[in-house]
Amino acid sequence: MTISAQGLAWGIPLLRLLAALLLLLAFAMLAQRRLLTLIHLLAWQGVVLATGTALVALLTGQTELWFSAALTLGLKAILIPTVLHRLLRRLQVRGDVEAVLNIPLTLLAGIALVIFAFSLAAPITALTGIVTRGMVGIALAAVLLAFLMMITRRKAISQVVGFLAIDNGLFFAATSATLGMPMIVELGVALDALIGFVILGVFFFQIRETFDSMDLQNLEHIREE
Amino acid sequence: MLILLVLACAAMGIPLLALWGDGRRGAALFIGLNTLTLLAILALAIQVLRDGAFTAGGGQFMVDDLSIVLVLVDGVVGLSTAWFSRNYMLHEKAHWLLSRRRVRLYHAMFQTFLATMLLALLTNNMGILWVAMEGATLSTVLLVSLFRTAEGLEAAWKYFILCGVGLAMALFGTILLYFAAQKVLGHGADALLWTHLAAVRRQLQPQVMAIAFIFMLVGYGTKIGLTPLNNWLPDAHASGPSSVSAVLSGLLLNVALYAVLRAKVLVDGALGPDFAGRLLMGFGLLSLLVAAFSMLRQRDVKRLFAYSSIEHMGLATFAFGIGAPLASFAGLLHVISHSLTKSSVFFSVGQAVQSVGSREIQRIRGLLEFSPFLGWALMLAVLFILGMPPSGLFLSEFLIITSTLQAQPWLTPLLLLGLGVAFAGIFPRLQGMVFGPAPEGIARQPVAGIIPVFIQLALVIVLGVFIPWILVQWMQHAALLLHG
């Protein structure tokens, strides 16, 4: 993929800015107790992703990436957050998210994860051109932070938000670090994400029906004999 | 063309079963579709026999000696599960008062699962392989929670989240693989095609490939059931219908291992055989030992055999890790025999659980007395899974131990310890389940549902006594392919 010198001058710093935003949003999610704000943050991550994809499309001139950017915007920034929002209201889940660890401690663990992600990605970034330097590290950090969020939360919805945030980090890796995966793979991944989301919706109602609550503490009955 | 035919046969069934998949008609349709798929697979096998490996659909689909063997197993187990499922679901439907819609959902999701398994085996694109694995996970989630019990929901949620996160790791590995491939093959759709990657595997950047492989091993390893990410497996096996447990153990674990093997061939080219091999051996042996010791404290019969699946997949992973052609041959034989045998175990366990009305091992007693047919089926299937001759698992375990003695002799005691503990975990319980007087109030189940067990066990004996030369040839080629 070739990028013009002009594109390099302003495009790459902009891409880096978006990467930094993605990471900041991941941290914000980690620190956020309220479910509603959590969903908003997820939507913003979707916006950042779509912008990043569109930027890469502009810089490299791959027309299929425009399609991918539109898909991201529609799916991750609008559709999924809206549906989550509605679910939240339909299921009448209110109140704060409970973190298992306290928040400053979680954030410290998050910083450690970012350092770990960068050191893991160091040998990869050393090999890459100027364009994508650092992107793999940031994407991996975003994935790990979302993972951390998932394991520190108890509510089903916040686990799902974590799950979708992992997906966002991976998507960022695919578009920014590799400048776009093959279209067919991207379509497949998007399809899987959509189906997964629908199944989760079904699940919410089943859990609600069976337990009268969305708290996953109810789901801790299977024990090893 | 035949590759596309196989996939079309399997995929065509999804909408059909979603529309008409209830009642007697649904079960018959399910069996018919899987018979058709098996016929298409046999035709494909004949073509592979004649022409060797080939690609189709502009290089997007591929079949070679490694995949054809597993595709055949998929076809056979798919058909026998459809057969078993007919009687099994009749009983479950009455017991759980499943609505017609729920039965349609069951059949459609089951067919989706079988189709995604075939897609995973027949695609040439490492990205589509991931998509198919994720599709298989999603389709089985609703099957695990089919009965909508609290336990089923919990198991399905755990399954969804753990495997979802695991597969996310595998996707990251795939992205890194593409990242490495771009440098050699250029940007574009062809850079993830396995045949292209295998041709240039020595030129891929070793640092990137090492990290990519670790992510793929962790990701797909979650689905193989490798320790420490195997928490979902016993729950999902225990809570879902037995027909689903049979295909989870018999097909899904295999295909996940297949994905790791495809990645291993590539990383071996870039890094030499030691890196991936040692990782596989380590994780395999650990899973074998942990699962064997976990078996000792199980009280639920389906959980017991779910742990046995982890044990066997650990052993197969270990064998592939050794890397010598003999060990890979043994690993492949082990995987095939395990699929056929373990699905038979779950068929017979499923019927036994229906008869007794409980999954507790303590309550399943004297099967031979009240239903000799079922008793024999369970006894033979379990003896075979323990590696008794003349089962194919005896031969494969013998070969694995032999090649361990050659390659890493100091690991042999650990291997034998694991197998011994697994034997001690299952054998005494088997005696309790089949012998002795039968308790009161048992509902006898129709014999027809258990016939597939005997057919599959006959195939396992063939694998143990006299492997057909066609299969030997395919497995030898596959072992050489894995050897690099």
Image: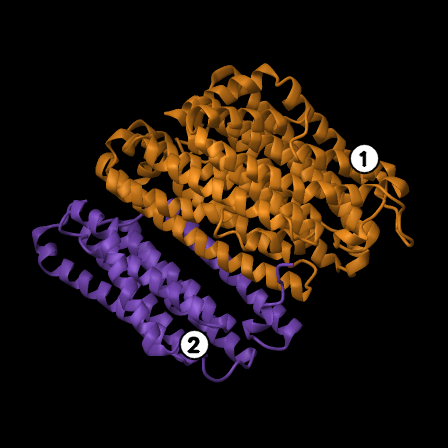
Chain colours: A purple, B orange
Q: Looking at numbered disc 2 in the image, what kind of residue is underneath it?
A: Ala
Image coordinates for residue B317, horizontal then vertical, percent: 48, 37
Residue furthest out toward the right: B440
Q: Looking at numbered disc 1 in the image, what kind of residue is underneath it?
A: Trp
Q: Nearer the viewer, residue A116 or B449?
A: A116
Relative to residue B266, is residue B103 depicted above or below? below
Left or right, B324 with respect to B419, comes to: left
Q: Which chain letter goes with mark 2? A: A
The residue sitting at 31% across, 62% down in the picture is A142
Location of residue B482 (image quadrant): top left
Relative to residue B388, is residue B244 depicted above or below? below
The residue sitting at 48% across, 52% down in the picture is B229
Q: Is residue A217 visible?
A: yes
The residue sitting at 46% across, 32% down in the picture is B320
Q: Are marks 2 and 1 on the same chain?
A: no
Marks 2 and 1, how far apart at CA:
53 Å
Identify the image quadrant of the C terminus of chain B.
Answer: top left
The residue where tag 2 is placed is A99
Residue furthest out toward the bottom: A95
The residue sitting at 63% across, 55% down in the picture is B144
Relative to residue B65, is residue B156 depicted above or below? below
Q: Nearer the viewer, residue B1 or B291?
A: B291
Left or right, A88 with respect to B99, comes to: left
- Asked which secondary structure carries label 1, the reply is helix
The residue where tag 1 is placed is B376
Structural crowding at the residue carrying mark 2, measured as other residues with C-alpha within 10 Å and reported as few (<14), some (14–19) or many (≥20): some
Q: Which chain letter goes with mark 1? A: B
Q: Is residue B25 visible?
A: no
Relative to residue B423, is residue B300 depicted above or below? below
- Asked which secondary structure carries label 2, the reply is loop
